Image: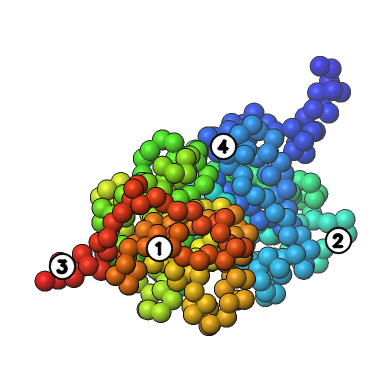
Amino acid sequence: MDDAEGRREEKKMREGMIISAGLKTVVEAIHASPTQSVLYLSGGASQAVAWLLSVPGASSTVLEAVVPYSRMSMIQLLGKIPNQFCSSHTAEEMALLAYNRALKLSSSGSPVVGVGFTGTLATSRPKLGEHRLHLSTRTSDRLWVSTVTLSKGLRNREEEDMVASHLLLKAIANACKVPGTFVSELTDSEVPDECEKQFSEDEELEQLINGQICFKVYPFSSEPHMSTAERKIILSGSFNPLHEGHMKLLEVATSLCGNSYPCFEISAVNADKPPLSTSQIKDRVKQFGNVGKTVIISNQPYFYKKAELFPGSAFVIGADTAARLINPKYYDGDYKKMLEILVGFKKTGSTFLVGGRNVDGVFMVLEDFDIPEELRDMFVSIPEEKFRMDLSSTEIRKRLEK
């Protein structure tokens, strides 16, 4: 390589067209970590996305990268007009939205990080205000926010974007708990203003109850095949207490579905009762830790809302629940409303696996109900010879109280 070619190669490297060996090592380590990410970036740090996608293994890490660049795009992402489009608070909100999106897109049980970035960097015309950037990462137990004001006139747009991209990649590496050596691109006067907050389990659960985060996974299961299964088999309930019938029902349902990720789910928010307290949630979660079964805590009591959180899943229910699902009484007596909601559930690719249960003193199975024709293919019967359990959590609880 002659000198001229070497200079061109060096220039490309500086401009981010070719990833350096050091950055490539960091990106490889990020891809090798179990953490999956969603990135929402506006106004800069574009090269960080290119670096992440240019190294093999990106599909294991990057679930989605969105650039809400226009004013209207940012408003639609946030669901409101922010006080400032470029601010640490906006970056924090973007990271939280990205975190919730990552929860919905991630592989079962994988840790996730939401990344938010908003910047106002050099442009083709002189800018009156500061050149600054705000970045934030959100994981289950940590929120990190950083603001950097760049020295005005020191760099052109490409160079400022390079600085922003380095800082963003470093933030992602830290969130993924990946060690790495980063050479600072900042001058002595460009000191990042950083803020970090760690969340306790109680604080996470409070955020879930309040609707800030959509669910929390306790991945107690250790079966190796689960990490590759995308479809969830979900048994929802209060599990007060968890009993052998629950375990057997989910086991049989999983055997009928093949490669899948079986898990239990509890809604902290109830349709007609006060929400569970954090201590109640933790007590119920302990049951699943004791038996090594994954449980998800959500804030959605209705199945059509659960299907939006976990599209394509198979929800395991008893015949008593199936009877309520197809009864217009529970939809304000409106048959059309019932059909509309259940067809919406069906469009998510979700199904119901129905086990036999006592209904008003009579043991009933799916075949005993008149399912509307439009919905029949989303209800699948669990044969009685494979599963039958007449005892309920309520009956067990009453016995224990005696």
Q: Secondary structure at mark 3?
A: helix
Which residue is at a point 42% across and 45% down the rendered structure image?
A: 254
The label on residue 319 is: 1
Q: Secondary structure at mark 2?
A: loop
What amino acid is found at the position of numbered circle 2 in the picture?
A: Pro
The residue mark sitting in front, 2 or 4, is 4
The residue mark sitting in front, 2 or 1, is 1
Question: Which of the 4 image quarters holds residue 217?
Answer: bottom left
Q: Residue 350 in the image: x percent, y percent?
A: 55, 56
Q: Residue 39 in the image: x percent, y percent?
A: 63, 52
The label on residue 126 is: 2
121 horizontally vs 35: left or right: right
The answer to which of 284 and 358 lies nearer the viewer is 358
Mark 4 surroundings: few (<14), some (14-19) or many (≥20) residues within 10 A = many
Which residue is at a point 58% across and 39% down the rendered structure image?
A: 60
Q: CA distance from mark 2 to mark 4?
A: 39 Å
